[in-house]
Image: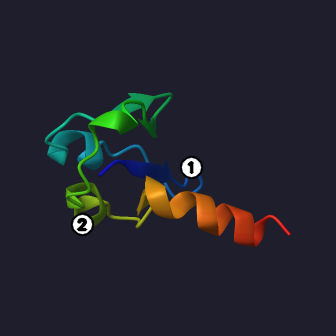
Amino acid sequence: MKYKVYVDQMKCIGCAQCYAVCPNKVFMIINKKSIPQYMDNCVGCRACIVRCPTAAITIMPRDLEAPYAKFYAT
């Protein structure tokens, strides 16, 4: 299953904990912020969510993304 990774840039402090703990190297640190650069590598292990000190990361299965987007678009 593929996952969509979101990083709230307002909460991200650029600590790079997500980068350090991610087994598949999904994240890059750009301009002192975490960016999910390689989302296709995400397996949904949630290690980044557990490690993030500011709760800036959210992971959602991509097959759930479309129904929610359609619901909130109205």
Which residue in the structure is indicated by mark 2?
50
- Density class for disc 1 (Cα within 10 Å; few <14, some 14-19, many ≥20) is few
Task: Give percent across and percent down for residue 60.
Answer: 43, 61
Residue 49 disc label: none
Q: What's the residue at 41%, 67% (across, down)? A: 55
Q: What's the residue at 51%, 28% (across, down)? A: 31
Task: Give percent across and percent down for residue 47.
Answer: 20, 58
Residue 61 placement: quadrant? bottom left
Q: Which of the marked residues, 2 or 1, is nearer the chain's N terminus?
A: 1
Task: Give percent across and percent down for residue 53.
Answer: 32, 64
Looking at the image, is 46 positioned above or below residue 13?
below
Which residue in the structure is indicated by mark 1?
9
Closer to the camera in the image, 44 or 27: 44
Q: Is mark 2 on a helix, strand or loop?
A: helix
Closer to the camera in the image, 39 or 70: 70
Residue 68 placement: quadrant? bottom right
Q: How far apart, in angstroms, are the residues tagged by discs 2 and 1? A: 17 Å
Closer to the camera in the image, 29 or 26: 26
Q: In this view, does 2 lie to the left or right of 43?
A: right
Q: Which amino acid does label 2 sit on?
A: Val
Q: Is residue 50 left or right of residue 70?
A: left
Task: Give percent across and percent down for residue 13.
Answer: 44, 50
